[in-house]
């Protein structure tokens, strides 16, 4: 593989993936396309921008002309699509842009892949396409055969994109793969998501807004493990296949928030129970047997180690997230949490 085009690389997982590629495949040219929405941050890619093998384009994946021009010029061998609107709460507030970016943007990219004979299109999807699992059935896990049954406009848009990706494989023979990963955590995650939001609020001695009773369960995976899974899939995965990615690390939200309080030596009295999210998925849990058996993937970072690394990163990189939360994020926060 000579040239990999990564979309959404100025966001959380995409940026981690770009650094993963630059470290593990220094011979590969990495092209990043990101329109820099509120969630994209070029400063995140500062170190990558110093490398001669890295090129950045500020463009929208929905902009057909711009995307085709980039493909014409760069001739990627592989496209990894991270670009998306990714926050469930925002999708409940304003679904439209989720449908545009997550579905139509994916279509534009796949059309470009067809025209320029790209050898692999990889869609970064989510376990949220499977809906949720009951809290009292720990024996149930999402497999690749679990029916798609979405809860939020975000997950519906990701599921629609997955179906389109599979249709492009069946109809046009486009060599696609899809990964459906559980919740990620790690450096550069935008502070609207649970873990960085709680770290940032705790460091400011602000209330820690737990939705409902905090009993919802997520299956947390350190972001580097996700990056390694994607890298294995694009190299050794079978075209047309879906791979679930997760590390058997189910935790209740309230336990994560308590752990963050303890790690930062902040009182649990900061925890404030607020109105629940509409349609709030109860539990996500991935069965990663397929990727383990077919590609030999296993998570390498235990949660205790990953969360320590993540908290340290937020302590050492205050400027990065303080800049974000002092900008338009304040308006978002007031709207979402002001009267909750
Ligand atoms: P993020 O919100 O941090 O980053 C998204 C990036 O996409 C941003 O840099 C943004 O500027 C860019 N983008 C948005 N719209 C665009 C457009 N129209 N054109 C070009 N760029 C655009 O998201 P993330 O958490 O890094 O998630 C990346 C992908 O992984 C998403 O597809 C998401 O659905 C999926 N995913 C995320 C998680 C998770 O826990 N965060 C878990 C599983 C799957
Ligand atoms: P989030 O990080 O938004 O990821 P997702 O909804 O995609 O799983 O939320 C993770 C869990 O944390 C989810 O159950 C909602 C909950 N949550 C809170 O309790 N308070 C918050 O302020 C946020 C952002 C999330």
Image: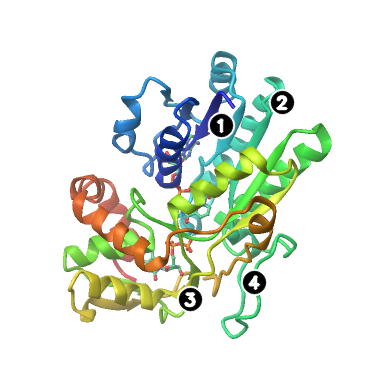
Q: Position of residue 44 (x, y in %)?
A: 32, 38
Looking at the rendered image, the disc whose residue lies closer to the viewer, 3 or 4, is: 4
Q: Which of marks 3 and 2 precedes in the sequence?
A: 2
**Residue 77 sits above or below residue 238 on the image:** above
Q: Within 10 angstroms of label 3, few (less than 14), some, or many (20 or more) residues?
A: some
Tags 2 and 3 in contact by the CB under 8 Å rule? no
10 Å crowding of disc 1: few (<14), some (14-19), many (20+): some
| Mark 4 or mark 2, earlier in chain | 2
Q: Which residue is mark 1?
A: 62
Q: Which residue is mark 2?
A: 114
Q: How is the image coloured?
A: rainbow
The outermost residue toward the right is 171
From the Cβ of disc 3, is ligand 2 less than 8 Å away? yes
Q: Which mark is residue 29?
A: none
Asked if the residue at tag 1 contacts the one at tag 3, i.e. Cβ–Cβ closer than 8 Å, the answer is: no
In the rendered view, does 247 fall on the left or right side of 253?
A: right
Mark 3: which secondary structure? loop
Q: Circle 3 is placed at which residue position?
A: 216
Which quadrant would residue 232 be assigned to in this image? top right
According to the picture, the residue beneath numbered tag 4 turns out to be 141
Residue 163 appears left or right of 331: right
């Amino acid at each position: 593989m000579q040239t990999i085009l990564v979309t959404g690389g100025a966001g959380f997982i995409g940026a981690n993936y770009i650094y993963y590629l630059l470290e593990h495949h220094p011979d590969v040219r990495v092209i990043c396309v990101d329109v820099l929405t509120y969630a994209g941050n070029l400063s995140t890619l500062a170190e990558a921008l110093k490398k001669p093998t890295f090129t950045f384009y500020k463009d929208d994946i929905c902009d057909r002309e711009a995307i085709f021009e980039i493909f014409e010029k760069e001739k990627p061998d592989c496209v990894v699509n991270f670009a998306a609107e990714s926050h469930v709460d925002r999708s409940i507030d304003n679904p439209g842009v989720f449908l545009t970016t997550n579905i139509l943007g994916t279509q534009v990219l796949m059309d470009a892949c067809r025209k320029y004979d790209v050898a692999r299109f990889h869609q970064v999807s989510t376990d949220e396409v499977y809906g949720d699992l009951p809290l009292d059935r720990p024996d149930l896990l999402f497999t690749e055969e679990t029916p798609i049954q979405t809860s939020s406009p975000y997950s519906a848009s990701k599921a629609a994109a997955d179906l389109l990706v599979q249709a492009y494989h069946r109809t046009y023979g486009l060599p696609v793969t899809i990964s459906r990963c559980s919740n990620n955590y790690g450096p550069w995650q935008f502070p609207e998501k649970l873990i960085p939001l709680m770290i940032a609020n705790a460091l400011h001695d602000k209330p820690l807004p737990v939705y409902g009773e905090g009993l919802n369960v997520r299956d947390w995976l350190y972001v580097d493990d996700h990056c390694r899974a994607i890298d294995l899939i694009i190299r050794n995965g079978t075209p047309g296949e879906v791979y679930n990615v997760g590390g058997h690390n189910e935790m209740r939200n309230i336990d994560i928030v308590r752990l963050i309080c303890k790690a930062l030596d902040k009182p649990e009295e900061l925890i404030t129970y607020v109105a629940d999210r509409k349609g709030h998925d109860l539990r996500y849990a991935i069965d990663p047997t397929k990727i383990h058996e077919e590609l030999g993937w296993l998570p390498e970072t235990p949660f205790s180690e990953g969360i320590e690394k993540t908290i340290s990163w937020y302590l050492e990189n205050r400027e990065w997230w303080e800049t974000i939360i002092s900008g338009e994020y304040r308006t978002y926060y007031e709207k979402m949490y002001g009267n909750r």
